[in-house]
Amino acid sequence: MPANNPAAAQSDIQAVERLCAARQKIHDEIGKVIVGQREVLDQMIVALLARGHCLLVGVPGLAKTLMISTLSRLLDLSFNRIQFTPDLMPSDIIGTDILEQEHDGASRFRFHQGPVFANVVLADEINRTPPKTQAAMLQAMQEHQVTAGGRTYSLAEPFFVLATQNPIEQEGTYPLPEAQLDRFMFNLAVTYPSLEEEVTIVTNTTSRYSAEVGKVLSGEEIVALQQLVLRVPVSEKVVRYAVELVRATRPAEAAAPQFVRDWVSWGAGPRAGQYAILGAKTLAVLEGRYSPGEADVRAVLRPVLRHRVITNFNAEADGVTVDSLLDRLLEAKG
């Protein structure tokens, strides 16, 4: 926060208070439609305010698509869904130049925007399309712009990509390369609901129950909050803690635990540390605090590292998953 400018500091404090209230209102509104999944929703809000993107991994029927579309409605953002299929082409995502006849009789090429031109883009089953089409999202996700026909077009802010993957049906899929996985801030594990939650879901969806969600934040407010997150101060101690945790996932590092050397082929890169700090800063602001601590880093580290740590055959043979490895790492480095 700008301590040398009292007026700006007071404005930021008021923005933090509004954001805390907005967070609760988001949960209240989306709770009319979605039962449970509070942690996943919180992580999606963190990624949005940190200008990151999310990969949601879960079996079919867990309301991933409904959660994303509902979030876009209550945040008053434009929303487009792209169903990724093997025959999808890059131009189907980005858009294409179409020859049109003008009123003066002359013919000119006019760019028709593809579905990527929206504030919230749902890339449904992104691993069902070939790498050439997957790569069409890379520039949009990293630079918030696309290039078509030799011209570059900027995407409206905020720009937020949420991609889904089915973890159990891998026939006919094209796994995302590590370079594209690294563009996602979070890998969110969408799990089964509890018994009581599932009873409520079945009851609501098999009746005349219908809910309308109200608007909570506008696109302009979200962009302002994204700038607020960047102004949040963070101590060198917390930054060093995040970087040391990330470096501990690399088996060649001297500080890496023995179990990392045994079970990991490749660890996380520097982008993981960047997202861990951005996520920690955002989480602190959402909870009404003006600077993050080590606990905030730990809270976001699993979704940050889940898709950036590649285990080896020894881990598979020993029944070690990435999540269990990260749990052990946090315990060892706590």
Image: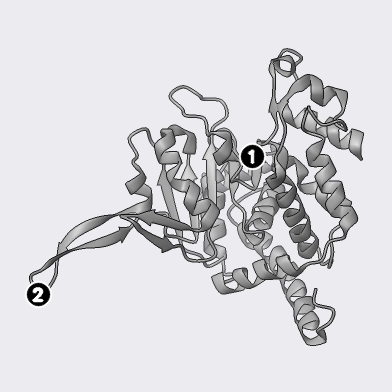
Q: Which residue is nearer to you in this view: 29 or 85?
A: 85
Estimate the x, y position of residue 275 in percent, counting from the top left. Answer: 70, 51
Residue under label 2, please give it: 104
Estimate the x, y position of residue 303 in percent, counting from the top left. Answer: 70, 42
Number of the front mark, 2 or 1: 2
For badge 2, the amino acid type reads Asp
Estimate the x, y position of residue 331 in percent, counting from the top left. Answer: 90, 35
Q: Which residue is nearer to you in this view: 230 or 82?
A: 230
Residue plotted at (77% across, 58% down): 283
Is the N terminus in the top left, top right, bottom left or bottom right quadrant?
bottom right
- Tell me the CA gap for discs 2 and 1: 55 Å
Q: In this picture, is 247 found above or below 208? A: above
Q: Secondary structure at mark 2?
A: loop
Q: Which residue is nearer to you in this view: 278 or 188?
A: 278
Q: Residues within 10 Å of mark 1 (few under 14, many from 20)?
A: some
Query: Which residue appears farthest toward the bottom when viewing the image?
Result: 7
Estimate the x, y position of residue 62 in percent, counting from the top left. Answer: 58, 39
Q: In this picture, is 65 found above or below 194? A: below
Q: Are marks 2 and 1 in contact (CB under 8 Å)?
A: no
For badge 1, the amino acid type reads Val
Q: Residues within 10 Å of mark 2 (few under 14, many from 20)?
A: few
Is the C terminus in the top left, top right, bottom left or bottom right quadrant?
top right
Q: Secondary structure at mark 1?
A: loop
Q: Quadrant of residue 5?
A: bottom right
Can residue 257 be seen from the camera position used here? Answer: yes
Residue under label 1, please give it: 190
Q: Which mark is residue 229?
A: none
Earlier sequence position, callout 2 versus callout 1: 2
Q: Is residue 170 left or right of residue 193?
A: left
Q: Quadrant of residue 234?
A: bottom right
Can residue 212 be seen from the camera position used here? Answer: no
Q: Is residue 54 left or right of residue 114?
A: right
